[in-house]
Amino acid sequence: MKRVMKAAVLAVCMAIIAGGCLLFGERSASWLAGSAAVVICGVFFTRFEKKETTAGEIALAAVMTALSVTGRIIFAPLPAFKPCAAVIILAGIYLGAEQGFLVGALTALVSNFFFTQGIWTPFQMMIWGLTGLLAGLLGSRLKKNQIVLCIFGALAGLCYSVFMDICSVLWLGGGFTPERFLGLTLASAWFTVSYMVSNCVFLLIFLKPAERIFERLDSKFGLGAGARRE
């Protein structure tokens, strides 16, 4: 019965994707990309739902998500200079890869109720989720070396900006072309640099406090140990 249900869900998803491609015509590539982002996020949410997770770990993920969302909203007057990516990276390092993805994806989803939802939301959920995931997979190396951590933060900012530029080009209409992408990337270069610098700055500010807090939680309550289990 479960296999039938899974096959039915897969068939419905494929039908939606195919119908969207026919409906949007020249924007079929953007519809496919958006659908892929939704599917990837859905897979990780499903895995997390089925995974045995303690109430304490869920609470920590919720707190990190709240901090990330709050930081993005508070720094709204400063375009592209926000602490949310740094919080997501630290969540991945100290809570583990899967919870890092969850914090990143939920940061985009929840904060966009303030910044407005749109086609960009699943793309932001995916890129920030993958940022938390990779931070969790590289957690031990990132904790040991601040230079490596800053490089990772800068690359995360660069990838986020480039990925969102690709999303913008896809949804402008007329399809993706290297010329349009290059023009948009050059026009948004200041934002890209700001993403990279802000990630490094906030990571350096938050690293030591986060290390002390999570080590105490781990030693006293056995929480924050997800990174070791991944």
Image (cartoon, helix red, strand yellow):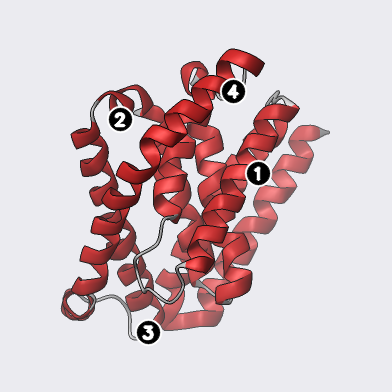
**Rendered image quadrant of residue 17:** bottom right
Residue 41 image point, x, y percent: 56, 49
User: How far apart in space, not on screen, are marks 3 and 4 (Cα)?
Assistant: 47 Å
Q: Mark 4 or 2 closer to N-term?
A: 2
Q: Nearer the viewer, mark 4 or mark 1?
A: 4
Q: Using residue 70 as the reference point, say whether residue 84 is left or right of it.
A: left
User: Which quadrant holds the N terminus?
Assistant: top right
Amino acid at pointer 1: Ala
Q: Mark 4 or 1 closer to N-term?
A: 1
Viewer-proximal residue among 14 and 216: 216
Q: Mark 2 or 3 closer to N-term?
A: 2
Task: Please report the residue visible at 38 percent of the width from the left and 73 percent of the height from the top.
Answer: 78
Q: Which mark is residue 62?
A: 1
Circle 2 — which element?
Answer: helix
Q: Is residue 172 above or below residue 192?
A: below
Q: In this view, does 28 lie above or below 95?
A: below
Q: Name the residue under label 4.
A: 217
Q: Mark 1 or 2 closer to N-term?
A: 1
Q: Mark 2 points at which residue?
A: 142
Viewer-proximal residue among 213 and 60: 213
User: How far apart in space, not on screen, are marks 1 and 3 (Cα)?
Assistant: 35 Å
Q: Nearer the viewer, mark 1 or mark 3?
A: 1
* Neighbours of disc 4 within 10 Å: few (<14), some (14-19), many (20+): some
* Neighbours of disc 2 within 10 Å: few (<14), some (14-19), many (20+): many
* Neighbours of disc 3 within 10 Å: few (<14), some (14-19), many (20+): few
Task: Please report the residue visible at 56 percent of the width from the left and 66 percent of the height from the top.
Answer: 18
Residue 161 image point, x, y percent: 30, 64
Q: Residue 35 carries which label?
A: none
Amino acid at pointer 4: Leu
Amino acid at pointer 2: Leu
Q: Name the residue under label 3.
A: 172
